[in-house]
Image (cartoon, rainbow, N blue to C red):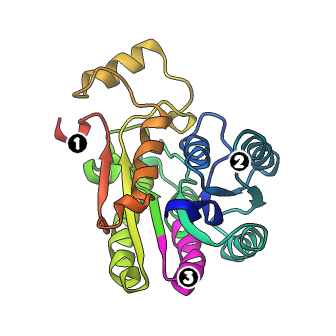
Amino acid sequence: MGDDRIERSAIVTGAASPRGIGRATALLLAEQGWNIGILDIDERGGQALADEITSGYSVKSYAAVADVANEGQVRSAIDELEAALPPLAGLANIAGVSSPVPYLELTGEEWHRVININLNGVHYVCRRVAESMARHGYGRIVSVSSISAQRGGGTYSKTPYSVAKAGVIGLTRALARELGPYGITVNAVAPGPIDTDIMGGPLTPERRAAMVDELLVNRVGVPGDVATAIAFLMSEEAGYISGHTLNVDGGLYMH
């Protein structure tokens, strides 16, 4: 985007969690010169991050509130972000929930809760943002899937999470095909174990050691590892990559 990046904005969903991938991504993109629209269900956390970005970086930031599982709220929030910021050119779909419930104990309510947030929510945000990107003839969409989608779980979260995250990969590929003619690339990242609250809280030394045993690198991932991958796929330089899922998993998929 060169010198005009200051006139472009990226929406980051699920950015308010203090130890999350969303926050790390929003801060990294702001550091790289993107204006940041924060979309989160946590109004206070979202506003605090917007204030932090505005005071710490020479970019604009604005926070809007929405439950991503509610399409009406998503559309209203993105309307609000679009009115407050320069043109939308990037989207990082990071909002999500974990679900450690074993399949034989799984309720219908839990199934729908996880699918609605982790898959339908990604679609609702993409659908609204794609309208604006298509109008501008440019866009970068990156969504967060998971190693769970490829391995069928085997992580903290189980069935509905794995299904939703697999759906994100399918959605990413289909959108890359449909939105390509509008100058929009669509990619996903598939994190392995990352030390965030979605893993079920802070990792004990024993749990951390057990995870590292499964990896090809000697540490568990941190939010910045995933943020760096998202920022690359959202960059001008990544324009020849679309429909791809980038594993950021310490080699777990190979293990």
Residue type at mark 2 is Ser
User: On the image, which quarter does residue 155 sit in?
Assistant: top left
For residue 14: magenta? no
Judge whether 211 appears above or below 49 on screen: above
Query: The residue tagged with tag 3: helix, strand or loop?
Result: helix
Q: Report the mark closest to the observer, 1 or 2.
A: 2
Residue 108 in view, yes or no? no
| Mark 2 to mark 3 CA distance (whole Å) | 24 Å
* Residue highlighted by disc 1: 253
Q: Report the mark closest to the observer, 2 or 3.
A: 2
* Residue highlighted by disc 3: 136
Query: Residue furthest toward the top?
Result: 205
* Residue highlighted by disc 2: 58
Upstream in sequence: badge 1 or badge 2: 2
Query: The residue tagged with tag 1: helix, strand or loop?
Result: helix
Upstream in sequence: badge 2 or badge 3: 2
For residue 137: magenta? yes
Report the residue at 32% width, 68% height from top.
Answer: 242
**Nearer to the camera, 134 or 249:** 134
Residue 177 in view, yes or no? yes
Query: Residue furthest toward the left?
Result: 254
